Image (tube, rainbow, N blue to C red):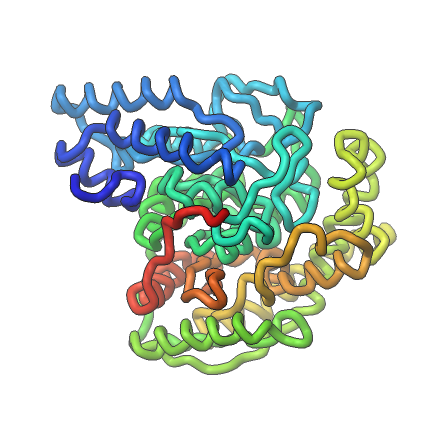
Amino acid sequence: MDTELWRLSATALAGAVADGEVSAREVTEAHLERIASVNPALNAITGPLTESARRAAAETDRRRAAGEPLGPLAGVPFTVKENIHVAGSATTFGVPRFRDLVPASDAPPVRRLRAAGAIPIGRTNLPDMTLGGLHTVSTLYGDTRNPWDPALTPGGSSGGDAVAVAAGMAPLGLGNDSGGSLRIPAAFNGVATLKPSYGRFPMDHRIGPQDPSLSSQLFPVDGPIARTVADLRAVCEVLSGSDPQDPRAVPVPLDGPPPAQGVRVGVVLDPAGPGPAPEVLAGLDSAAAALADAGYRVEHVEVPRLQEAVEGYRDLIYTEFALIWPTVRQLLTDDSSRHIEYSLAERPPVGLSEYIALPGLRLGIQRDWADLLERFPLLLGPAYAGLPPAPKTLLRDVEDNTRTFAAARLCRASTFVGVPSVGVPVGIAGGLPLGVQVIGGMYREDLCLRAAAAIEARLGVLTPVEPRS
């Protein structure tokens, strides 16, 4: 092909492999070479899965040569965050304690991607136990660097996958989001992502046989990072549906009832109190104009009970964390423990009666959001209300921690409610990418993806990029 293979989207690569235009081996080798070329500077991939990827590519090529059916993502490489199980590869969570935690089987989304023909090509970095804050740095692997500017954070906690996809090391990444962990690094690196509804994709984050606490059941969701919205849609089709390994996953059709013409979109301008940075506001304006050009009816709205949702999110998580923190703290360094310690200092755990009331608070806020999303089927807002900061500015004290996560409160509130969101790039300002998120009602990923595709069609795709030194 005339275009370097590592530059192509997942759907383009799958089509080329299916048509025999390229082999899965050629696709895999192109991405392994790209990893060898740029990962030393970026430190996004903690370890290439070289030999297993080559074996999987050879099997794909054998199947095609034999005329056997191929999956919809056959031959497409993808990366996997190091808190999602890949059979035969350590799920380290970035800390020494789990360096040798090698699962015998894949987590549900990895299993489904493999069944669709996709090929795991590398594991990716994350903050220690996903708890270290906004920046992707782990005890085992060190700092991951933003390809647009290495002095700035790539975001977290799925920063390794966002950087790998942005720099062309893989067209797809598999990470997770429990309050912005897909959407923020996607915005900081100029790529697209899907945070699905609660229950849309099956997953399994157990380290051992014990199931997680309530907040860890309700909030984290696995999801894809890609360079195009079409690739997100393709992965969504593969990952959706019920699974006996995760009884929370529901068999909801991917496409809901077709919307009427001129879908109303509510633009959320003030998710961080004082409001987004000027560059972020300009990106929102560009996205709103793109949607208006595509026939959407764009209006400004106020999100109901936004601050209550953020406080309920924090109370549920940090009250539970306070109970296990003495044990978890032993797995972390002083640096990687600061975010949780500062968060506990900022908002101490609630008492038993308040904790018991939190699910009721959540249900009421879900009801109010559902009412808004009945009138405005989509919301448009920032993934993060500021530009990527320098890592050293994030955790100097409690005030830094508070300021950092205030800019992500629309992510936290939408996680508390459980609704889907698609992050999509909207341009560049001062040499840095800008991104927004499109939020929809429960199980209306289809509406989010359609609107994000309209934005992408008018504002373009920003990556892959060559890393800046």
Q: Position of residue 318 (x, y in %)?
A: 77, 49
Q: Nearer the viewer, residue 6 or 83?
A: 6
x and y percent of residue 362 in the render?
Answer: 66, 60
Location of residue 98 (image quadrant): top right
Quarter assignment of residue 144: top right
Residue 129 vs 253, above or below: the answer is: above
Q: On the rendered structure, is 348 left or right of 97?
A: right
Name the quadrant containing residue 29.
top left
**Quarter of the image with the N terminus in it:** top left
Which residue is drawn at the image coordinates 60% and 66% (left, top)?
Answer: 386
Horizontal arrangement in the rendering, residue 384 relative to residue 447 (left or right): right
**Residue 175 in view (yes/no):** yes
Q: Position of residue 248 (x, y in %)?
A: 53, 41
108 up-or-down from 51: above or below: below
Number of on-image labels: 0
Residue at (55% x, 44% y) in the render: 145
How far across and how far down the image is residue 21, in percent?
A: 14, 35
Q: Relative to residue 400, is residue 294 drawn left or right?
A: left
**Residue 441 seen in the current view:** no
From the viewer's perspective, is residue 80 above or below residue 360? Answer: above
Residue in the picture at 19% in, 19% down: 62
Q: Residue at x 49, y 66 (%)?
A: 430
Q: Nearer the viewer, residue 375 or 234?
A: 234
Name the foreground residue: 402 vs 372.
402
